[in-house]
Image (cartoon, rainbow, N blue to C red):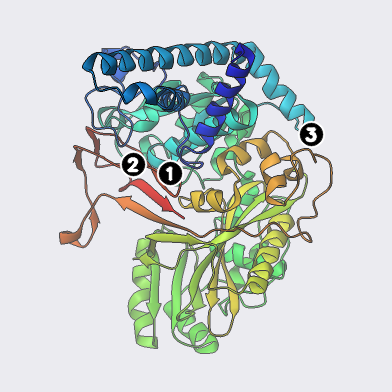
């Protein structure tokens, strides 16, 4: 075979292997040489090997380099070519076969590595990224990115953005990832530290000392000269001070603007905005209120106060108007705190002080009718700086424990397609009305009997369960967040165009997101969270050593983990350390 054909065949194997690896969450990733800010910070500084990849329980550290995919493909091809030798019964023939197979594999890998090296020199990689952004109408290039998170979020972000660059641009190292790492995460062999190009050791302990510390994140971003900060979920991801202060530093925040985040972080204001955009709301203490944002990005105070209750007596009066049972909720609550179901006047009087005590001091409180037997339905939305908003189908997250999701699935088949289209259009209108930029989730309550749906909230961040949407739509969400923040219009992003049935060579035909229909997903996806909890103690989060993680991904069932073999879950870590998906 001519050498040119062999190179084309090898390149094809490389792309096919990467595409068939493990959807968007399990891209082959390079194991970098870690560079800490202190000589004693982390495995690289003291000469220890990097953490192993999840599922690898061998004694040799897993490198998980992009070349490992074509290595496997080449080995398989070599085995097929040498099948006739394998039929030989003599031991000498068998040994000769093994030597030849190894030699063939090494030669193929060497050729691919040379080709990859030639393609991914830093200067050429940057030029290719700049060309991509320019051709698609973008206004800025973001190359060096601070991941202001840890655990699952940080792991997924790095894997996804690297895979997108590899499959879309043919580049495996165009982005530089800087991560913040506590001593607890370093000692736990956290996967995200191994995947990063650079880590900066930050104080240990509660997240107010590190990943939720806005000032620390900004100081790190400035010191590391990053172009952008990716916040993930949890920690500081919904703190409007973070995008505000980063903007002052000239650093791009990969998420919505500060005023928008601020108003959406308040459930009362979010419901008023939803009503203003014509999104159905369940009966609550702010029925019928509408308002436009002020120049400061807030709801007028007089309108806002009309949606609140300040005493148990006011809550009782509201409940009697809208009908029992009701939910008494703190606007700034979350994670199952600051929320109580009440079926009578007496229960409101007993529970109201508990809601006040569980929520942050001074948090406004409101009352909402309980939608019994409702399903928790989500619509994944993305808005750009050009005023467009796309809905990327949705998820059913009704299986919960203590108001925390356990399983997620999509599409949400319990909702008729025409009704779900209405939910998507309402979410898009809300996104456009408030000038939302980036990925977010509009959550609804859906009554399966009456087929009615009601606005619940808009989460101004990416959510843990977003890989369900990635598998349904073929859209890499962290990479799309990045492209939107580079100023690229949604209708120019190739994966979104493909989701709308556009051919690869069709790069100019317009997409009217509020009118055009996308190609409905041909599959169903379900996800399960893997958590460290003690079932004998009410499923409370627990910590400890992980001796082994053995999970073999396939095309139809895959997963990713925030720790590897011989890692651990420390006391300040989130209890979720894995996520498994199947279709």
Comes first in the chain, label 2 or label 3: 3
Single out the mark in the foreground, 2 or 3: 2
- Residue at the location (44% across, 20% down)? 198
Q: Farthest residue to the left: give it.
A: 536
| Label 1 element class | loop
* Rendered image: mark on residue 137: 3
Comes first in the chain, label 3 or label 1: 3
* Rendered image: mark on residue 364: none
Question: Quick check: 195 left or right of 48?
Answer: right
Q: Is residue 268 above or below residue 60?
A: below
Of 45 and 320, the residue lying toward us: 45
Q: Is residue 290 above or below residue 130?
A: below
Q: Is residue 339 above or below residue 44?
A: below
The answer for how far apart the CA atoms under marks 1 and 2 are is 31 Å
- Residue at the location (59% across, 29% down)? 165
Of 189 and 101, the residue lying toward us: 101
Comes first in the chain, label 1 or label 2: 1
* Residue 292, quarter of the rendered image: bottom right
- Count numbered badges in the picture: 3
Residue 393: image location, x then y, percent: 61, 59
- Residue at the location (64% across, 51% down)? 260
Q: Which residue is mark 1?
A: 235
* Residue 104, quarter of the rendered image: top left
Q: Which residue is mark 2?
A: 552
Dot 2: within a 10 Å radius of its alpha carbon, few (fewer than 14), some, or many (20 or more) residues?
A: few
């Amino acid at each position: 075979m001519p050498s040119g054909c062999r190179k084309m065949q090898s390149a094809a194997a490389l792309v096919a292997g990467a595409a068939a690896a493990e959807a968007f969450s399990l891209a082959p990733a390079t194991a970098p040489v870690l560079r800490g800010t202190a000589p004693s910070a982390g495995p690289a500084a003291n000469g220890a090997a990097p953490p192993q990849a999840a599922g690898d329980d061998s004694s040799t550290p897993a490198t998980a380099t992009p070349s490992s995919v074509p290595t496997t493909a080449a080995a398989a091809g070599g085995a097929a070519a040498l099948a006739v030798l394998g039929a030989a019964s003599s031991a000498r023939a068998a040994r000769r076969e093994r030597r030849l197979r190894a030699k063939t594999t090494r030669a193929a890998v060497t050729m691919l590595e040379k080709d990859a090296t030639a393609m991914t020199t830093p200067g050429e990689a940057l030029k290719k990224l700049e060309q991509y952004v320019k051709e698609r109408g973008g206004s800025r290039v973001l190359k060096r990115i601070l991941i202001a998170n840890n655990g699952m979020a940080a792991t997924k972000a790095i894997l996804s953005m690297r895979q997108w660059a590899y499959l879309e641009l043919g580049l495996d190292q165009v982005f530089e990832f800087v991560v913040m790492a506590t001593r607890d995460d370093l000692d736990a062999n956290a996967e995200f530290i191994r995947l990063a190009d650079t880590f900066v050791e930050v104080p240990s302990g509660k997240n107010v000392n590190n990943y939720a510390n806005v000032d620390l994140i900004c100081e790190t971003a400035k010191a590391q000269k990053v172009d952008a900060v990716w916040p993930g979920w949890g920690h500081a991801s919904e703190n409007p001070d973070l995008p505000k202060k980063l903007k002052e530093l000239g650093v791009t925040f990969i998420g919505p603007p500060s005023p928008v985040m601020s108003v959406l972080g308040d459930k009362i204001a979010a419901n008023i905005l939803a009503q203003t955009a014509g999104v159905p709301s369940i009966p609550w203490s702010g029925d019928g209120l509408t308002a436009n944002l002020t120049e400061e990005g807030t709801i007028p105070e007089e309108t806002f106060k009309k949606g609140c209750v300040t005493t148990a007596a006011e809550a009782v009066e509201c409940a009697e108007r809208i009908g029992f049972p009701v939910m008494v909720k703190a606007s700034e609550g979350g994670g199952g705190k600051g929320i109580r179901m009440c079926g009578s006047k007496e229960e409101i009087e007993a529970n109201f002080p508990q809601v006040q005590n569980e929520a942050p001091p001074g948090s406004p409180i409101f009352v909402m009718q309980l939608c019994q037997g409702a399903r928790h339905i989500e619509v994944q939305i993305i808005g750009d700086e050009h005023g467009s908003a796309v809905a990327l189908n949705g998820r059913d997250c009704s299986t919960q424990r203590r108001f925390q999701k356990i399983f997620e699935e999509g599409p949400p088949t319990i909702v008729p397609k025409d009704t779900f289209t209405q939910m998507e259009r309402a979410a898009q209108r809300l996104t456009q009305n408030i000038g939302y930029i980036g990925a977010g989730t509009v959550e609804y309550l859906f009554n399966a009997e009456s087929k009615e749906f009601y606005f619940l909230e808009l989460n101004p961040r990416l959510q843990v369960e977003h890989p369900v949407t990635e598998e349904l739509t073929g859209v890499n969400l962290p990479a799309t967040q990045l492209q939107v923040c580079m100023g690229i219009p949604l209708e120019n992003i190739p994966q979104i165009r493909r989701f709308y049935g556009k051919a690869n060579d069709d790069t100019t035909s317009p997409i009217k997101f509020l009118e055009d229909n996308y190609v409905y997903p041909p599959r169903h996806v379900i996800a399960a969270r893997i958590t460290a909890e003690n079932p004998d103690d009410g499923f409370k989060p627990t910590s400890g050593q992980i001796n082994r993680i053995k999970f073999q991904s396939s095309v139809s069932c895959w997963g990713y983990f925030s720790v590897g073999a011989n890692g651990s879950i420390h006391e300040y870590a989130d209890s979720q350390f894995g996520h498994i998906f199947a279709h």
